[in-house]
Amino acid sequence: MFPIGDDNSSRRTVPLVTYALIAFNLLFFFIELSGGDAFIMKWAFIPSRFLANPAGDFLTLFTSMFMHAGWLHLGGNLLYLWIFGDNVEDRFGHTKFLIFYLLCGLAATFAQLAFSIGSDIPNLGASGAIAGVLGSYILLFPQGKVRVLQGQRVIQVPALIVIGLWIVLQLFSGIGSIAATTDTGGVAYMAHIGGFLAGFLLTFILYGNRNKRLAA
């Protein structure tokens, strides 16, 4: 199942922050392409380097959130941000949503760091922050529907199923990555899991228990 959109009928505002994040991710990716490996090594988050000099490497906590390993990585992340981010932003408000997004990204980075101390592999991508958006979406729109492409048909599927399948994949892949003995590049599954859990918890903290939280 390939998600292509969701129900925006209840959205009341223009998702300016979501659009800005998509644009900034695109812009930063083009800069990354022009800068090559030197740019990646300078601005990606490298666990061993950060632990050796947290103050000097502080900015990479944020710059790494807007870097991607390739077009497929970029496209998949921005697709999920476009589908789910606008609705979450509508509920939080622009400023609070931006804070939420960045906090989820930081939580994702530190979750990955906890399982890769001493690693020299660059960590990059918006996946952890977007995982947080998905965690929030489940709480805010538990009865939401997502349009997915299945073969040549477009069908409506509960958001819980689409996101739930994504969670299961990240969970089992993440458990497998903990046991890995090789220090090679790949998908930072623990960042996905950490970002998702952060999004879930931050929704309670930043949004509270308002009745409209559970509206479809």
Image (cartoon, rainbow, N blue to C red):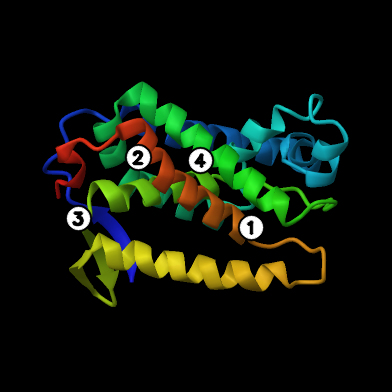
| Circle 3 residue | 144
* Rendered location of residue 98, percent (x, y): 43, 28
* Three-letter code for the amino acid on which mark 2 is drawn: Phe
User: Does residue 20 show up?
Assistant: no
SS for callout 4: helix
- Picture quadrant of residue 211: top left
| Circle 1 residue | 188
First-in-chain label (2 vs 4): 4
* 18 or 111: nearer the viewer: 111
User: Does residue 206 show up?
Assistant: yes
Q: Are marks 4 and 3 in contact (CB under 8 Å)?
A: no
Within 10 Å of disc 4 (Cα), the crowding (few <14, some 14-19, many 20+) is many
* Three-letter code for the amino acid on which mark 4 is drawn: Cys
First-in-chain label (1 vs 2): 1
**In the image, which disc is placed on residue 214?**
none
Residue at the left extreme of this rendering: 9
**In the image, which disc is placed on residue 104?**
4
Q: Are marks 1 and 4 in contact (CB under 8 Å)?
A: no
**In the image, which disc is placed on residue 204?**
2
SS for callout 2: helix
First-in-chain label (2 vs 3): 3
* 7 or 134: nearer the viewer: 134
Q: Which one is in front in this view, the residue at disc 1 or the one at disc 2? A: 2
* Three-letter code for the amino acid on which mark 1 is drawn: Ala
From this view, report whether residue 102 is shown above or below residue 131.
above
First-in-chain label (3 vs 1): 3
Q: Which one is in front in this view, the residue at disc 2 or the one at disc 3? A: 2
